[in-house]
Image (spheres, grey):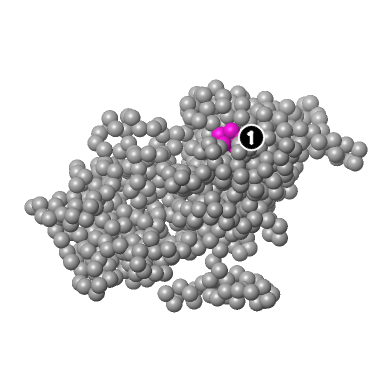
Amino acid sequence: MYQIRLHGRGGQGVVTAAELIAWAAIADGRYALAFPSFGSERTGAPVEAYCRIDEQPIRSREPVTEPDLVIVLDATLLRQRFVFDGLKPGGTALINTTAPDDAAAATVLTNGSGHTEANGTDVTNTGLTRPAARDAAGMTLCAVRVRTVPATEFARQRTGRPLPNAAMLGAAAAATGIVPLAAVRDAIAARFSGRVAEANAEAAADAFEHIRRAGDRFYEDDARDGAESAAYSTPEVPGARS
Amino acid sequence: MPAPDVSARRGITPANAPAAKAGPAAAQQAAPGRAVEGSRAVAETVARCRPQVVPAYPISPQTHIVEALSALVRQGVLAPCEFVNVESEFGAMSLSIGASAAGARTYTATSSQGLLFMAEALYNAAGLGLPIVLTVANRALGAPINIWNDQSDSLSQRDSGWIQLYARDNQAACDLHPIAFRLAEELSVPVMVCMDGFVLTHAVERIAVPEQEAVDAFLPPYRPQQILDPGVPMSIGAMVGPEAFTEVRFLAHGRMQRALLRMPELAERYAKLVGRPSEGLARGYRLEGARTVFLAMGSVLGTLEDVIDEARADGLAVGAVELTCFRPFPAHRLRTLLAGAEQVVVLERAFSTGAAGIITPELIAALADPPAVPARCSTVVAGLGGRPITKKALRTLVRDAAASRVARFSFLGLDRDLLSRAGYGRASDDAPGSTAERLLARLHAREESR
């Protein structure tokens, strides 16, 4: 089971992005489940959405608390939400920002990429709020991949509107290989029509290329020891095709 | 250039995803269905049941279901059908009563306070024996205003005389609708199909919308038992005094009892037509040797069954029962399923303030019928007002239950810290007045302090 959590603001197409990933994965022959966090949606308010992908039918309907991939459509959320809570070791943080990967990585690592499952903290009451004791003994040292992409810029260039969701899907396809770019393109075409669909597919392709061209790195969380984050180069992302 | 792979060194797969499959061959083998939102899939299914009148209040609390149906009517996909925008949910059910009495297959949908606004007319629809089908997108009732999912709305209409069916997922939500229409029309009893709001209605997943041919083979055209026709005058809704009112209710109860026999038969026949397992009255999950059984209705079943699988792997003798048909209450079926259980933990998505669970007392009564099924029953109120029911919380509950540490009545994940911060730590602290704003203020203060 591959689990994705998306963070953004009302009006950025966060829920649509989650649905399009599910659409693409299902069109690709797998099972998927996408759903929003169901706030009272208002433009600009923080919004979360989730997507699960599996080879088997998916039964669980709880919100995603331990994502393999966190997609942040609005980098201003990094200052005020604990958007990386529960990100799994080896997971990916994909952020819509013009900042380079390295700069964003520091933010991610100080923002709570801790894996808190074993620390015994009861977070069931509060659902998605930050686990209270992420530096407790149960926290595992983890390495996460941090990728940044100027998705809003790509969207503006291609569509004339600053809606980053389609571009972020292209970036997610490149960064994780969870769905092929062609499936993202099909999902966009199925949801939108005419020039809007075309322009969004172009923005997705731009973001896909952007991620592919940049080097891939793992950022290791040694923050517990007060050490600086270390960056490693890794080979081409497996599964990123088309 | 390949470089040292830190992930491999740490035993981590860089993209630990099920790999994207190549080409259509993979898709061929996959299950049928397509990516579609729950509400949309239900709307398409309802359209294939060929309703002739769909009156609906188009404003919140409403679902995408009637929005999609209005589009299908406008496009001529659903024809002949009259979609009527009405001024309120009371209007929607009142118009449904009129349309159904005039001989039309009638459908509508609502949610939350919208269902309450229908309440007076709901009782009339049932009392008049009109086979209306209503989808309830289950949501909490205010105040405090909430909008999120629980099952307080439909359970508040427990005694309205409607059959109530609860969907565990969106596939079931679709498949229950043709069954609902047929059951309603055979028995002259209206049916509510209840599906968890947002969790199901707003989820996009792989759903097989039943084919038109299958629905047509299963659901014959509606032949009304009574038709309001000026050419052949008759009375519907006559006043009934003390001399016969009890007997009318007695017969209504009898129809409900017939539904207990008929519903599983129809579900089985439908299942054969569509080639999917059927939703009967209630279904057991891993009950073999289960000493502790969790009983629930609706979308929590999926998450619960995942947790049951984990617990079984750990050697705990636990299982689950999915209650699909809440009205009529399938006492006999539940007795059979729970015959071997030592304790039953009922996960309730609503409760009766000042008493306890809503399902549990009925279950206790059903099990107590001699020869009594000796299982000890407890109520765990969970997921009120949209609070997520997480696997983590369920794991703890399953472990507690297996160790017989579950109280007769409790709330899953009650935030005692918040309560005590707001001065509700001791009963003597409970100041009169509205509690909601006081809790909210402390909640914000607590989040600020983190």
Residue under the image location 60 percent in, 27 percent down? B266
Residue B280 counted in the magenta span? yes
Which is nearer the eye, B436 or B294? Answer: B294
At a point 28% along the width and 66% down the height, the residue shown is: A108
Q: Position of residue B96 (x, y in %)?
A: 67, 40
> Horizontal placement of B258 versus A160: left or right?
right
For residue B147, say whether it is visible. no
Q: Quadrant of residue B204?
A: top left
Q: Nearer the viewer, residue B342 or A141?
A: B342
Taken as a whole, is the magenta stretch helix, strand or loop?
A: loop
Q: Position of residue B234 (x, y in %)?
A: 81, 30
Which residue is found at the position 37% from the left and 71% from the top? A80
Answer whether residue B41 is magenta in the image.
no
Q: Does dot 1 land on a helix, a strand or a loop? A: helix
Q: Position of residue B128 (x, y in %)?
A: 76, 37
Please name whichever residue, A45 or A133, is drawn nearer the observer in this view of the structure: A133
Vertical comparison of B32 with A139: above or below: above
Above or below residue B430? Residue B313 is above
Screen quadrant of the C terminus of chain B: bottom left
In the image, the segment drawn in magenta is B279-283
Total marks drawn? 1
Estimate how packed mark 1 is, as few (under 14), some (14 to 19) or many (20 or more) residues with alpha carbons within 10 Å. Answer: few
Instruction: Report the residue that reaches farthest toward the top.
Output: B217
On the image, the x and y values in percent for residue A110 come to 29, 70
Residue visible at 10% across and 52% down in the picture: B2
What subunit carries mark 1?
B
Is residue A90 visible to us here?
Answer: yes
Circle 1 residue:
B336
Along the horizontal axis of the image, is B159 left or right of B443? right
Left or right: B400 as drawn, with respect to A157: right
Identified by mark 1, the residue type is Thr
Q: Is residue A201 left or right of residue B306?
A: left
